[in-house]
Image (cartoon, grey):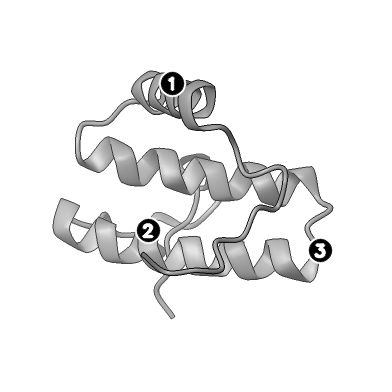
Amino acid sequence: MKKLIRDNYETIINPKDLSIASNPERRGYLLAKLKEELSELEKSNYSDPNEFGDVIEVLYALGGLSGVTMDTISVKRLKKKNTLGAFNKGLILTKAE
């Protein structure tokens, strides 16, 4: 089974068992990893900070493939939060426009 692993695992895993994905392949592996990490977050009942961190790390890697840095993501997130708000109140749109 092929799956994306964290970079530092290359120091503890036999090099014969590793390969490096091309950028187009990497996007697919990152999307699969995102689904895996979201599933693990759900299994933790959304209470494990490590699982939140794993999801964010995968999102940063996906952004990096497109040249979008962590700093840019943070700035854009905060700008939107400051102008439109966050998702903390649980507001639900009940009437489609």
Q: Identify the residue at image location x=42%, y=19%.
A: 75
Q: In the image, is residue 94 above or below residue 65?
A: below
Q: Are marks 1 and 3 in contact (CB under 8 Å)?
A: no
Q: In the rendered view of the protein, which quadrant contains the N terminus?
A: bottom left
Q: What's under tag 1, amino acid-wise?
A: Lys
Q: In the image, is residue 67 above or below residue 36?
A: above
**Distance from the alpha carbon under mark 2 to that under mark 3:** 21 Å
Q: What's under tag 3, amino acid-wise?
A: Ser
Q: Which residue is mark 2?
A: 30
Mark sitting on residue 7: none
Mark sitting on residue 44: 3
Marks 1 and 3, the one that precedes in the sequence: 3
Q: Is residue 18 left or right of residue 52?
A: left
Marks 2 and 1, the one that precedes in the sequence: 2
Name the element at disc 2. helix
The one of 31 and 93 positioned closer to us in this rendering: 93
Circle 3 crowding by C-alpha within 10 Å: few under 14, some 14–19, many from 20: some
Q: Is residue 64 left or right of residue 34?
A: left
Circle 2 crowding by C-alpha within 10 Å: few under 14, some 14–19, many from 20: some
Marks 2 and 3, the one that precedes in the sequence: 2
The one of 50 and 20 positioned closer to us in this rendering: 50
Q: Which residue is mark 1?
A: 79
Q: In the image, is residue 69 above or below residue 35?
A: above
Name the element at disc 3. loop
Which quadrant of the figure has residue 69? top left
The percent coordinates of residue 10 (x first, y second) are 46, 46
Q: Residue furthest bottom?
A: 1
**Distance from the alpha carbon under mark 2 to that under mark 1:** 26 Å
Q: Identify the residue at image location x=26%, y=58%.
A: 27
Name the element at disc 1. helix
Q: Please state which of the two labelled residues, at mark 2 or mark 1, is closer to the viewer.
A: 1
